[in-house]
Image: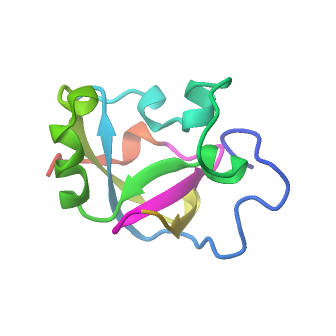
Amino acid sequence: MWFEQLPTMCPPATAVPPAAVFYRLTESEHPTCEDFWSHRKLNPDTKYNTDECHARAVSVFNISNGLTKLLKMERHRHKAITAIKLDKSAGLVERNGAPNHYSWWRSENFPVLQSIELTP
């Protein structure tokens, strides 16, 4: 059911089906599927400052302004802001962390690249 293996009790009971456009930093203006992988899938041996459930979520924002500040950081300067329409077939989201930040647990069959919208 999920794009990657999740721990028990994940996603949390507070997660809900999305129904909005969300924004994410991608490596270029032409995103690939890998741009929508969790930190854990990208870096399986890294220790994160969060629980394993959230390490296996994809970080998205509900407004593009939330990413504008991140683009000023050296490690993100080359990236692009990508808009993606998430609906109930996308999986579940939970608001957490920084303002306007959400964790997204991708469903296995969600057509991520076909759901990309025009860049803000």
Q: Is residue 30 magenta?
A: no
Residue 109, by quadrant, is top right
- When the figure is inspected, residue 45 is found, relative to residue 100, above or below; the finding is above
Residue 32, by quadrant, is top left
Q: Is residue 108 magenta?
A: yes
Residue at (24%, 44%) from the top-left corner?
Answer: 70
Q: What is the number of callouts on the image?
A: 0
How did the renderer colour the structure? Answer: rainbow
The x and y percentages for residue 42 are 56, 26
The x and y percentages for residue 23 are 31, 53
Tell whether 21 sits left or right of 104: left
Which of the two residues, 79 or 69, is positioned nearer the viewer here? 69
Magenta stretch?
98-111
Which of the two residues, 65 or 120, is positioned nearer the viewer here? 65
Residue 76, by quadrant, is top left
Is residue 28 shown to the viewer in this render? no
Is residue 5 shown to the viewer in this render? yes
- When the figure is inspected, residue 84 is found, relative to residue 112, above or below; the finding is below
The x and y percentages for residue 87 are 47, 64
Residue at (46%, 42%) from the top-left corner?
Answer: 112
Residue furthest to the right in view is 8
Residue at (54%, 64%) from the top-left corner?
Answer: 93
The x and y percentages for residue 66 are 25, 58
- When the figure is inspected, residue 78 is found, relative to residue 53, above or below; the finding is above
Tell whether 117 sits left or right of 55: left
Residue at (43%, 71%) from the top-left corner?
Answer: 19
Tell whether 86 sits left or right of 84: right
